[in-house]
Amino acid sequence: MTKELYIAGPMGFSEAGRDFMYNRLMPAIKETGFSIIDPWKLTPQEQIDKILAMHLSPEKQKALADMNRKIGSKNEEGIRRAFGIVSMLDGPDVDSGTAGEIGFCYGLGKSVLGYRNDFRLSSENIGAKVNIQVEYFILNSPGGEIISSISELPSALTRIFGTP
């Protein structure tokens, strides 16, 4: 059985992010032999779209609150099932959901690979690439590291997660 890696990041929120995730990142991971747990597929989009199509009302608010808990639970299950995570760190600050997933993964004692291709400063000081606490969790996870290019991905996956 191949090792499954959970893909953490906000890419599913935008067309550009989905294009990168599904046409660059995930194919590069799959080419190395790892399987992928895609949190954007853990909850069927049709269920989410049905609620989003509702008119603004207390019922919609409750349905969204229920869906939010379902999504969070599915993502927790995915992280628990995963061998480790590959986390997307681009942006002016690490996405808060991604930061939570990194911390949870670290707390489980699993490995975290960070990817940051964004050249903007994103930390409290020049001694870190991203938020100090997020970077600490990544670098102190077993074999954890932060890479800055897709070309580094195959060797980093093998270093951090071993053979698929």
Image: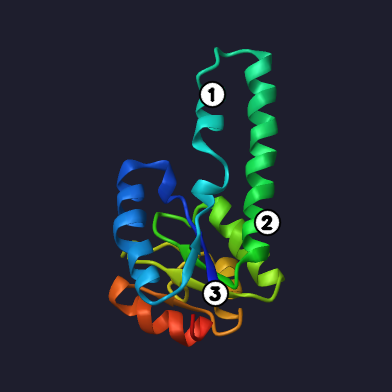
Q: Which mark is residue 77?
A: 2
Relative horizontal placement of residue 32, taking residue 100 as reference (left or right): left
| Residue name at image x 54 percent, y 56 percent | 98
Q: Position of residue 112 (x, y in %)?
A: 55, 73
Q: Secondary structure at mark 3?
A: loop
Q: Which mark is residue 35?
A: none
Look at the image and tell me in which quarter the N terminus lies.
Answer: bottom right
Q: Amino acid at mark 1?
A: Lys
Q: Secondary structure at mark 2?
A: helix
| Residue name at image x 45 percent, y 84 percent | 158
Q: Is residue 48 above or below residue 95?
A: above
Depth check: 81 or 108 in front? Answer: 81
Q: Secondary structure at mark 1?
A: helix
| Residue name at image x 48 percent, y 55 percent | 9
Instruction: Please give the residue where the numbered disc 3 appears in the rendered image.
Output: 3
Q: Position of residue 70 (x, y in %)?
A: 67, 40
Instruction: Please give the residue where the numbered disc 1 appears in the rendered image.
Output: 50
**Mark sitting earlier along the chain (1/3):** 3
**Mark sitting earlier along the chain (3/2):** 3
